[in-house]
Amino acid sequence: MGAAGGVEVREKSIRVNFTYQGKSRKETIVTNGEPLPPTPANIKYAYRLAAEIKEKIKHGTFVYADYFPASKLATTGKPKTVGEHLYGHPRSDAIEWAKEDKFDSEKEKARLLIAVMREHIRARYGIKE
């Protein structure tokens, strides 16, 4: 069946479809380690769950692990700092260098950090120059 209202009823399970962080996500509703069977009551529950998830995403309070703890996308829900986002970036050495304050001026330090952040954002979101 289709995914009207963000719910996809399958033969032996129910999936919730939503957009999170700009990407389409499909997650099977699981309870006690098993897919939730597509009974009328469970389907009704799935529609309420889909609406709740979309509302939390809209307000920025959605925590993936609260709803889909077994998902590879599940995190603690704690927002990452800019430094955590940039850690592991090809120019993360520049960030470490910036922490050591090896700059002639704050302006020079700011320019480097802004350049690193721009590179990261472009790479992360596929933005072309």
Image (tube, helix red, strand yellow):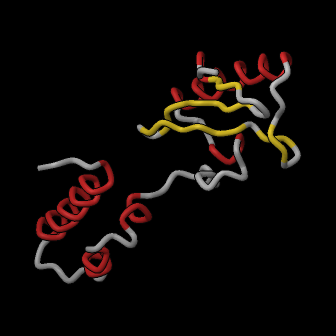
Q: Which of the two residues, 21 or 7, is positioned nearer the viewer here?
A: 7
Figure check: 28 above or below 109:
above
Instruction: Describe residue 33's horizontal placement relative to residue 107 as left or right.
Output: right
Q: Position of residue 23 (x, y in %)?
A: 44, 39
Instruction: Describe residue 105's horizontal placement relative to residue 73 as left or right.
Output: left
Q: Position of residue 114 (x, y in %)?
A: 20, 59
Identity of the residue drawn at 17% across and 62% down: 115
Q: Position of residue 85 (x, y in %)?
A: 40, 61
- Write down the quadrant of residue 14 in the picture: top right
How many discs appear?
Answer: 0
Quadrant placement of the N terminus: top right
Instruction: Describe residue 96's horizontal placement relative to residue 127 as left or right.
Output: right
Identity of the residue drawn at 28% across and 53% down: 121
Instruction: Describe residue 89's horizontal placement relative to residue 33 as left or right.
Output: left
Identity of the residue drawn at 76% across and 33% down: 13
Identity of the residue drawn at 44% across and 58% down: 81
